[in-house]
Image (tube, rainbow, N blue to C red):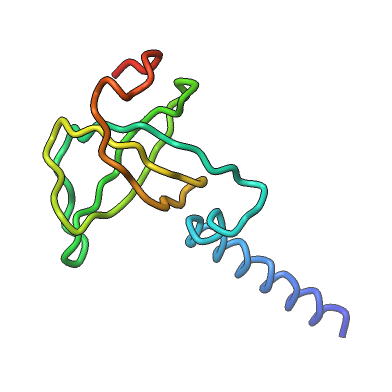
Amino acid sequence: MKKGGAVAALIIIILAVFLVMSARDVVDRFNPLVPQEDVFVRIDKPAENDNGRYKYELTGYNSEGKKKKVIFTSSTQLPEGTYLKVSAKGAYTESYTKVKEEDVPRNITW
């Protein structure tokens, strides 16, 4: 009986780890330990088609100049060279706002 309980517990742990790894953005969205931060990005490559939406996988920088990877979708294709301020919480992207180049912090170098 003990052996069966250990196997069941191991299977549950493996499934939980798989769920966390495959749905990281959902986990980050509700995790109170993951801080929300603004990440500045520049559209420097075309979007990928994602079931009728435009998916962007970009490298951006927070206000301290730390490099961050952001993934988000848009209903419209954004022109290359557009600057955005992305509200991100870990792997979860809440929203984005277009900003002017002069609104991007000076310590960020592309």
**Residue in view at x 50 percent, y 61 percent:** 26
| Image side of residue 106 versus residue 53, left or right | right
Which residue does the image show at 17% across and 47% down from the upper left? Answer: 47
As displayed, is residue 109 above or below residue 97? above
Instruction: Choose top left, top right, bottom left or bottom right for residue 75.
Output: bottom left
Q: Residue at x 45, y 29 (%)?
A: 62
Q: Is residue 76 above or below residue 57?
A: below
Q: Position of residue 91 (x, y in %)?
A: 47, 48
Task: Write the residue at 33% across / 23% down.
Answer: 104
**Left or right: 17 as drawn, with respect to 54:** right
* Quarter of the picture holding the C terminus: top left
Residue 18 image offset from top left, x and y in percent: 55, 63
Q: Left or right: 44 with respect to 72?
A: left
* Residue 92 horizontal side relative to residue 97, left or right: right
Q: Quadrant of the N terminus?
A: bottom right
Q: How far from the left and from the top, in percent, is residue 81?
A: 15, 30
